[in-house]
Image (spheres, rainbow, N blue to C red):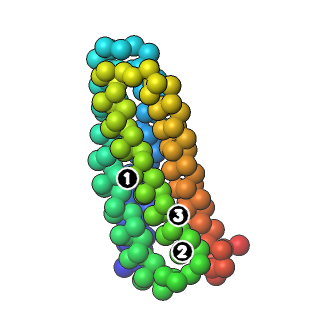
Amino acid sequence: MTKLFLSLHVVAAVLAVGPVAVAASMFPAALRRAYSAPGDGAAVTGLRILHRICRVYAAVGIAVPVFGFATASSLGVLTSPWLVASIVLTAAAAAVLALRILPDQGAALAAAQAPDPAAAARTPARLAMLTGVFNLLWVVVTVLMIVRPGSTTSA
C-alpha cells in the first residue's frame, strides 16, 4: 500500500503543482502585455486562462498532502523532522498561493480590463516575486522529500 500511496503522491505533485508553478510564473509577463495594450482581448483571454489553470490545479493540488500524509503514515515517519519541515513549507506554499497569488491574479485580471497606471507598475512585479517564493518553497520541499535528512536511505 505504501508504494501505491507514494506513487499517487508523486503523480499528484507533478500533475497538480507543476501546472500551477508554470501558469503562475507566466502570469506576470502576460499581465505586463495586457497592461501595455489596453483593450487587447487576446491578452485578457490569456490572463483568464492562466488564472483558471492556477485556480483549478490549486484545488486538485489538495491531493498532494492527502497522499503525502497517507504515505508518511504507512512509512511511520509522521514525526520525522524533515517531514515536519516539509509539511510546514507546504502549508506556507499553499498559503502564499491561496491568500496572495490567486487573489492578486483575480484583481489584476479585473484591472486589466480597465487598467490603473499605478497598479500596472507594481502588480506584475509583486506577482512575480510571490510566484518565485511559491516555487522556491516547492523546490525546498522536493529536495527534502528526496534527501530526507537523517533517514536510513539518504546517502
Residue drawn at (48%, 86%), measured in percent from left and top? 76
Q: Tell me the residue that label 3 is attached to.
A: 89
Image check: 12 left or right of 136? Answer: left
Residue under label 1: 98
What residue sits 30% from the left and 54% below the top? 59
Q: Residue lying at the far right in this picture: please name it.
A: 155
Tell me which numbered mark, 2 or 1, is placed earlier along the sequence: 2
Q: Relative to the observer, which residue lies in front, 55 or 2?
A: 55
Location of residue 70 in the rendering, given as x and y in whole percent from the top left corner: 38, 76
Tell me the kind of residue under disc 2.
Leu
Query: Which secondary structure lies at badge 3?
Result: helix
Please report whichever mark, 3 or 1, sits nearer to the chain's N-terminal start.
Answer: 3
Q: Name the image quarter holding the C terminus.
A: bottom right
x, y percentage for residue 26? 46, 33
Residue labelled with disc 2: 83
Tag in front: 2 or 1 = 1
The reply to whether discs 3 and 1 touch (Cβ–Cβ < 8 Å) is no
Which mark, by number, is residue 134?
Answer: none
Q: Position of residue 153 (x, y in %)?
A: 63, 77
Q: Amino acid at mark 1?
A: Ala
Against 59, residue 71 (above or below) is below
Q: Residues within 10 Å of mark 1 (few under 14, many from 20)?
A: some
Residue 11 falls in which quadrant of the image?
A: bottom left
Q: Is residue 21 left or right of residue 61?
A: right
Residue 94 found in image quarter: bottom left
